[in-house]
Image (cartoon, rainbow, N blue to C red):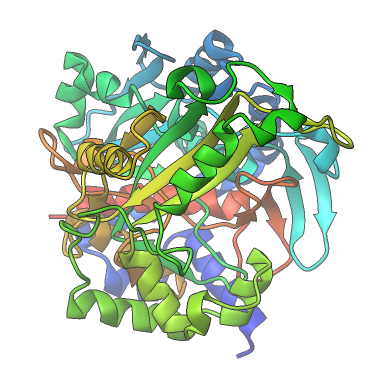
Amino acid sequence: MNDKKSFETNRRSLMKGAAAGAMMAMPAAAFAESSDLAAIRKAVVAGHDATVKRLQDWIANPTIAAEKRNVEGGAEHMAMLLKEAGFQKVRKVPTDGIPGVFGTLDAGAKSWMGIYFMYDVKQFDPAEWESPPLEGRLIDKPGVGKVIMGRGAVNQKGPETAFLAALHAFRASGRKLPVNIALVAEGEEEIASPHFHQVIADPEVQAAMSKCVGVLIPSASQGSNGAVSLALGAKGAVELQLIASGERWGRGPKLDIHSSNMARVDSPAWHLVQALSTLVKEDGHTPAVEGWFENVKPLTARQKALIAEGARQSSEEAVKKTMGVQRWIEDEDYQTSLERLASQPTINIQGLVSGYTGPGGKTVLPGRAEAKIDLRLVPDMTKEEAVAKLKTHLEKHGFGDIEVNVSGGYGPTETPEDSALVRAEQAVLTRAGITYSMVPRMAGSWPGVVFTGPPLKLPAAQFGIGRGEGAHAPNEFFVIESSNPKVAGIDEASVFFADFLYQVASMK
């Protein structure tokens, strides 16, 4: 059987529900529920246009935390989406920053499932895009299929819309939801969730989440080959700004002055560059902050084995092409690069801003310079530890005057491989005939530690099928109808989430 026929068979099995293989794979109690997938599939297909319109409307309503853009409007839209999907109780949760949104859908089931949404998106420059970033235009992409292009399409509104479509399909088909849902959404994920802990600390939110078997953030996890990578955790992240100014330094100008004065006046811009050069070793990537690796937990033999299996199942060439890179650090092999990706904490310069940045030159000596920095943390590092060590390092090396402005952050997260959540993910992937591998943690970050850490201590993970590209970049897209038989479109992703909820209900 060729690849196309094989996938189509698996896809029909998933979309129709009852298949002989599924009967063997599932407990008898869950199989009766899974047979309802045919009706849910029919409802998903019937609601396809409404689902796409729902996603387009959401893309057109962006909350951008870094710019404080559409704060109240974004929260209201998020609340509306939950009410329309059947959540009986929905409310905004105030914070010292942008509000969260919390909702519960009580179906009278035995188990509760936690869901995490983010409703904010990254900034964008329309001039860099092939189509308007807030239009959500449907585009035929060669080799991919029909996609929706827009800011937030894959990160994370597309996968989240697919999950909401599953809930709509349960209602439309008259099928009972097999689990109850407690959903919490935040509007500051893209600035490292500075106030999300306040949402989780809300008594009603914490009480509901504490009943859940785990927490899921819907995602589009398939690569171009259709395989899924199951992450057992994620790195932590800290966003901060390092600011050098003549006023705080006591040297250099308080404001921009004529560049001829470089002969006799100190430069805050060079001062910042010199400070930055102390943060990494001469290789340009290894953190040089004293004690940085003190609490870094090395990869276990099992974690290295998972990485090796993932390397065998993925295409190094395809990954490099997508990233636009030609070689890894120190010309390392693919597996070593993946081990580094999972295990190494980093200090990254996102951007440098100082003086005049327009066309041509302006011959100024800037009075201020700013570096936008992100730190990626691995177990057992903490946000507080990393920031403290960075400040101590700057002070020790003569840069104590440089302002360290922490704008957000959280620690790394880990979920046990044998948790009910991970076992449910594996079961539905196996039933759908989708190849998958597991990795110790994602190199990217999300605030899962608020769930996996105290007081909740729940398993939490990103999960889902479907595909998209361009998160944080121009021309971000999410696949609506896939031309690749190995990759799911939005309808298949929705039915997959429904199957996942049935699987969660059956777990012991």
Left or right of 41, for residue 425: left
Query: Please, is residue 219 above or below residue 54 in the view?
Result: below
Q: Residue furthest right?
A: 360
Q: Residue furthest front?
A: 264
What x and y, as percent, mark residue 370?
Answer: 55, 32
What x and y, as percent, mark residue 380?
Answer: 17, 53
For the N terminus, the quadrant is: bottom right
What x and y, as percent, mark residue 100?
Answer: 39, 18
What x and y, as percent, mark residue 419?
Answer: 17, 58
> In which quadrant of the rendered view does residue 424 lie?
bottom left
Residue at (52, 58) in percent of width and height:
15
Residue at (14, 31) in percent of width and height:
210
In the depicted view, which residue is nearer to us: 147 or 304? Answer: 304
Q: Residue furthest bottom?
A: 1
In the depicted view, which residue is nearer to us: 111 or 55? Answer: 55
Query: Please, is residue 497 above or below residue 99 in the view?
Result: below
> In which quadrant of the rendered view does residue 427 lie?
bottom left
For the C terminus, the quadrant is: bottom left
Query: Please, is residue 190 above or below residue 427 in the view?
Result: above
Residue 249 visible in this rendered orientation of the protein: yes
Residue 39 visible in this rendered orientation of the protein: no
Left or right of 126, for residue 265: left
Residue at (30, 42) in percent of width and height:
390
Count of numbered tags: 0
> In which quadrant of the rendered view does residue 382 lie?
top left
